[in-house]
Amino acid sequence: MTKPPKHPYGPRTRAVRGGMNRAFQETSEGLFLTSGYAYDSPEQAAARFSGEDDGYIYSRFSNPTVQMFEERLAAMEGATWCASAATGMAAVTAALLGQLSAGDHMVASRALFGSCRYVADDLCSRFGIEADFIDGTDLSAWGEAVRPNTKLFFLETPSNPGLEVLDVQAIADIAHLHGARLLVDNVFATPVLQHPLEMGADLVVYSATKHMDGQGRVLGGAILGNDEAILADQLRPFLRNTGPALSPFNAWVLVKSLETLDLRVRAMCDNASRIADGLAAHLGKPLRAVTYPFRDDHPQAEIARRQMEAGGSVVTIEFAGDSEQAQAQAFRFLNALELIDVSNNLGDAKSLATHPRTTTHSRLSEEARLLQGVTPGLVRLSIGLEDAADLLGDLDAALQSC
Ligand SMILES: *Cc1c(COP(=O)(O)O)cnc(C)c1O
């Protein structure tokens, strides 16, 4: 495997200056809102198409602004390469369909984001790619699910919305023992808090829509890795020919947003951690659980502390009571919030609350939902950048009204 590039600068410097490609000594990155490029001559056009000249051809293939985003994110992640996509789901789909063929098998953690589960399960099976969905926290289950045709392990940590934390290093070792690759959806941790490639993962995938934009404006996604062959032979042909390209405008918004990602994510984590502790005062009544990866009562707190720099920006709460009561309580609570918005997004500067069972995970069967902790009483809180005291005040008042 290719070694990741060594960067002379620290992570914050890379986030601000990585990938910069100036045309006129501009201080802000240029927005090249162009779909195509003219050539000096037919010979140059031919050389571009044959690969002898690596200039731009068409923005479905590459674009200067998109490339700045990709190079900056690769520098932040410590990856050799980054391939962007129009959305996080376009990146996940390309990562799976670019690598797997009919007759291949994948082992995936069952705690997956709803659309990831659709692609890995419903869509892949239509094209003859089989998958087993296991309890990812049970390390022996990974090896037991392996078949002779297993090519890929796929997991999300912390998971959306259950906040299950999986041991990336241990699972990467099991994958490699069986000749399979590990793909990690690192959306909840962001490149600020967790580096799956350093822990042995082969590929990392992101929704840039979440913390990277972080201000609710644009959609985007990315796949990163260190093995050039995966990009050159599998992902690039898939991305270039099927066309889930990131718009140059969105890439420009995202490349600027990466400059402040570290500051925003750390501030969100500080807020989230204070809020998780504050919410614990409501345990017993009306809450059955408050879940946050860095709290001592999280079942995988030790793994979380080992592989993440902070606990992330998401806290979940679960209302007590039987299913109908618990869901009614959750709805009463959501209706009572005055500051925090009801929305299905996350990683935003604005704090957002979601009822996963009836929104992001509504398409799954009740059985699949319950297996990943998506109960009728579960509410996901994406903590933003407001004052923690204001957020806690809003949450306390809404909980008291339940
Ligand atoms: C949101 C999300 C995605 C999908 O990203 P989009 O940009 O919405 O397509 C994938 N995985 C996780 C964990 C997510 O939270």
Image (tube, helix red, strand yellow):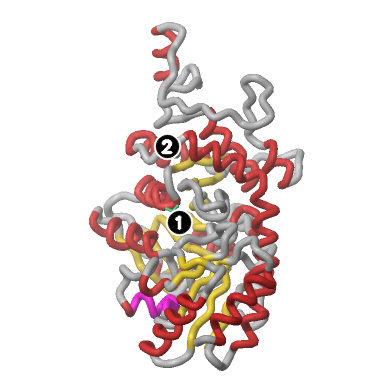
Query: Which quadrant of the rendered structure holds the N terminus?
Result: top right
Q: What is the number of callouts on the image?
A: 2
Q: Is residue 152 above or below residue 251?
A: below
Residue type, mark 1 in image: Ala
Magenta segment range? 367-374
The x and y percentages for residue 247 are 44, 37
- Packing grade of label 2 (10 A; few <14, some 14-19, many >=20) is some
The x and y percentages for residue 314 are 57, 68
In this orientation, which residue lies closer to the viewer: 332 or 45?
332
In this orientation, which residue lies closer to the viewer: 129 or 219?
219
Q: Is residue 243 above or below residue 270?
A: above
**What is the distance, in whole Å, between disc 2 and disc 1 at their CAs?**
20 Å
- The residue that mark 2 highlights is 236
Which residue is at 44% across, 63% downward? Answer: 344
Q: Residue 176, can we see it?
A: yes
Check residue 368 for magenta coloring. yes
Q: Which mark is residue 180?
A: 1
Secondary structure category for the residue under label 1: loop
| Label 2 vs 1, first from the N-terminus | 1
In this orientation, which residue lies closer to the viewer: 231 or 180?
231
The x and y percentages for residue 4 are 63, 43
The x and y percentages for residue 402 are 50, 87
Q: Quadrant of ligand 1?
A: bottom left
Check residue 97 for magenta coloring. no
Q: Is residue 269 above or below residue 395?
A: above
Residue type, mark 2 in image: Arg
Secondary structure category for the residue under label 2: helix
Q: Is residue 240 above or below residue 38?
A: below
In the picture, measured across the screen, residue 126 lies left or right of residue 121, that is left
Q: Is mark 1 within 8 Å of ligand 1?
A: no
